[in-house]
Image (cartoon, rainbow, N blue to C red):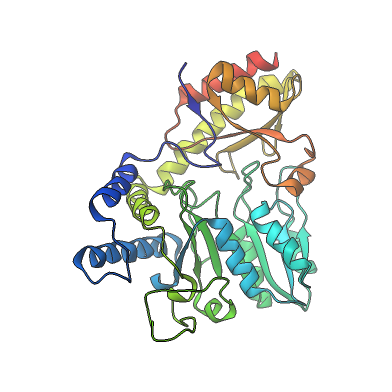
Amino acid sequence: MDKIYLDNGATSFPKPKDVAEAVYKYMTEVGANINRGGYEAAYDLEGTVFETRQMLTDMFGGSDCKNVVFTKNITESLNVVLKGFLKPGDHVLCSSMEHNAVMRPLVQLQKQGVEFDRIPGNTNGELALDKVESMIKPATKAIVMSHASNLVGTVNPIEEVGAICRKYNIKFIVDSAQTAGVLPINMKDMNIDALCFTGHKSLLGPQGIGGFILDEEMIKLIEPLLSGGTGSISHTEEIPDFMPDRFEPGTMNLPGIVGLHAALKWIDEKGIDEISKHELALTERFLEGLKPLEDKGSLKIIGLKEAAGRTAVVSVQTLTIDCADAAFRLDSEYGIATRVGLHCAPNAHKTLGTFPVGTVRFSFGIFNTEAEIDAAVKALSEICG
């Protein structure tokens, strides 16, 4: 039985061949560290890391490549930014569709005296933009939100929200987990002060590498969450006050950065617009294929019914069979990999009216084909009746 991978919202697969080859070459031919080795291989590797920072700066419209900080993943990035920036007595706004990578740090900070409110959304996951300004308080220090929902793919109007942040002189923190690599992002144009990213989703890199990019003014406003050796100013036990060392203690995930470097080159050659066009065409094909099943009451498409205004993520509730049973049968009988449950976004499900049942989520990537989409529609037709 051929396997069909439709869980790219969790992690993209397969990766470009160049990514695996770059990681293998590093592991078998280089193996060096940076900032610690006084030899040619370490210096050459440092050049690759620098170039990766520059590529990310160019992709996301950052101000300076030194302000790109590498972490293990976007969850770590959000924790560093939120916990380092927010203080007791501060207030922050988020959307009602946030992933637990945002919500769990905020709930943890709430117990320490930080307040937050959720900007409401409708049952398509669309942000109530007209409510934002009225929710800003004198103590509001930031708005934090995902660029797009990991549950239904609905894209948030971050350019408009960024303009509101500038109007009220509050900081804007963006979770780009579902959009980096498929939607254009420009920190300057969108007034983003801190952009958090992960390498293993649509940036097509390995797991275990992520990061964040800061606007110049944000650097001193964030207290480092982690500290330790950086290979720089080793004569002092104080945390470096310069970038990126201020936020990059310890040994870096260099295989991950090397793999991400290769992935970014692949994306640049392919073109973000072409990648997005392909994924949204598959999404439209899938949605069209599901409409007859929805019309006869076999399943329900959750969120937007068209490809416009979304990423390549589609969630459904199967109405004639339990969602978990449907996902199991998709895998065991048809070889189709999906994700089922609440997707680490319980309040998003409450917003959409799908809590506590959850959904079966299909998420498409650049390497998926029309034939795979048709096979998924056919499998759902047979499973749901």
Which residue is outermost to the left?
A: 40
Q: Where residue 64 sits in the image (x, y, percent)?
A: 41, 73
Q: Where residue 332 sits in the image (x, y, percent)?
A: 58, 19
Q: Residue at 21% of width from left, 68% of height from top? A: 39
Q: Is residue 311 visible?
A: yes
From the viewer's side, name the closer residue of 310 and 369.
369
* Vertical relation: 364 (above or below) 74: above
From the viewer's side, name the closer residue of 82 and 281.
82
Q: Is residue 175 visible?
A: no
Left/right of residue 137 with respect to residue 325 in the rendered view? right
Q: Where residue 319 sits in the image (x, y, percent)?
A: 76, 23
Q: Where residue 170 sits in the image (x, y, percent)?
A: 66, 75
Locate residue 191: give its quadrant: bottom right
* Vertical relation: 269 (above or below) 108: above
Locate residue 74: give its quadrant: bottom right
From the image, which quarter does the C terminus lie in? top right
Q: Residue at 64% of width from left, 13% of height from top? A: 382
Left/right of residue 159 with respect to residue 140 in the rendered view? left
How many marks do you count on the picture?
0
Q: Residue at 48% of width from left, 74% of height from top? A: 228
Q: Residue at 67% of width from left, 19% of height from top? A: 292
Left/right of residue 155 with respect to residue 302 in the rendered view? left
